[in-house]
Image: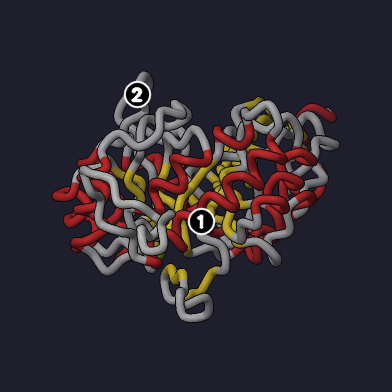
Amino acid sequence: MKNKDKFIIAKKNYSSRLIVGTGKYKSMKECAKAIKISGADIVTVAVRRVNISDKNKPLLMDYINPKKITYLPNTAGCFSSDEALRTLRLAREIGGWKLVKLEVLGEKKTLFPDAIETLKSTEVLTKEGFKVMVYCNDDPLMAKRLENAGACAIMPLAAPIGSGLGIQNKINLKIIRNQTKLPVIVDAGIGQASDATQAMELGCDGVLINTAIAKAKNPYEMAEAMKYAVISGRKSFLSGRINPNLFGSASTTNIGII
Amino acid sequence: MRKKNKIKITVNGKQTIINSNFSLKNLVDKLEIPLNKIAIEYNREIIDKKKIKKILLSKNDKVEIVHFIGGG
């Protein structure tokens, strides 16, 4: 089971089903250490202007080696298709990245994705040769449309980005999982280890976590907790759980009772 | 006289004064930015980094230089 259970995105095999975001840490050093502990081999990164007035500002690449860990450029902060396309085309130019995470936000309060702009961007990026992992709402119909538009992974939210509310719609996530052959990675809203386990127990293929680790009182311990939560949830899912029963069933035989 | 040899361009939203004969490569070198860690947009067009030597900067040009930072 161990060896056959592969986590494949865009034809590439990854060892960890936990993807970690690199934002919100106190320092790059803390970020790099937490990622190492989490065991993640994919990390999301954002594209921003170089600080031209402070040349000594540390660079992410000095702390997290893109040759050892897969950088997944995202479009954090983009509120239109044009902005997202511009960002990912630039990301590709930095170093040939084709695997990207698309997120086009609809409004600032909930940070919910704008489904129409997201779909539009997915179509364009796919035509341009990008492998697009797409952040979306937990809507099975939209997930299907994104798949048809050429997405290489579906990334439905558990709850709003950074909210830590945990999975709000288990049923929808399960439907999304069951209707597609693409990897389904729960993205956004994870608050604690049990949320990650629950996502995996629903059959999802992976989990993306940023705030829950970066903003935990102890990010290192939480990174480790998430690592095991994902492994545990996956094993639990694959092991075939017992049927839930309304009544008790004794664990010990009555034979030989005194 | 000396002032004539300088031009104003915008780099990452900031007005910057450079020598009028500067290429995009000269600008990147002056800013001491490692080329393998960035992407460049020149007047809204993404530039192949191999070709920046050939692009001569002119007055009011807009240059964006981006890199990866932490993000979720």
Q: Which residue is mark 2?
A: A110
- Mark 2 closeness class: few <14, some 14–19, many ≥20 residues within 10 Å: few
Q: Secondary structure at mark 2?
A: loop
Figure quadrant of the C terminus of chain A: bottom left
**Left/right of residue A166 with respect to residue A178 in the rendered view:** right
Q: Which residue is mark 1?
A: A232
**Left/right of residue B59 with respect to residue B16 in the rendered view:** left
Q: Which mark is residue A54?
A: none
Q: Secondary structure at mark 1?
A: helix
Q: Amino acid at mark 2?
A: Thr
In the rendered image, which quarter is residue A179 located in? bottom left
| Residue B15 position (above or below residue B37) | above
**Residue mark closest to the camera, 1 vs 2:** 1
| Residue A234 position (above or below residue A188) | below
**x 60%, y 49%: residue:** B40
**x 46%, y 74%: residue:** A6
Which sits in the foreground, A25 or A7? A7
State which chain disc 2 sits on.
Answer: A
Residue A147 visible here? yes
Which sits in the foreground, B13 or A236? A236
Q: Going by the picture, which residue comes out furthest to the top?
A: A109
Residue A176 position within the rendered picture, expressed as x and y whole percent measured from the top left: 23, 54
**x 74%, y 34%: residue:** A52
Residue B58 position within the rendered picture, expressed as x and y whole percent measured from the top left: 62, 41
In the rendered image, which quarter is residue A24 located in? top right
Which sits in the foreground, B39 or A137? A137
Give whichever of discs 1 and 2 has the lower sequence position: 2
Residue under disc 1 on the same chain as residue under disc 2 = yes
Q: Amino acid at mark 1?
A: Ser
Residue B48 position within the rendered picture, expressed as x and y whole percent measured from the top left: 58, 62
**Left/right of residue A146 with respect to residue A48 in the rendered view:** left
Residue A43 position within the rendered picture, expressed as x and y whole percent measured from the top left: 58, 52
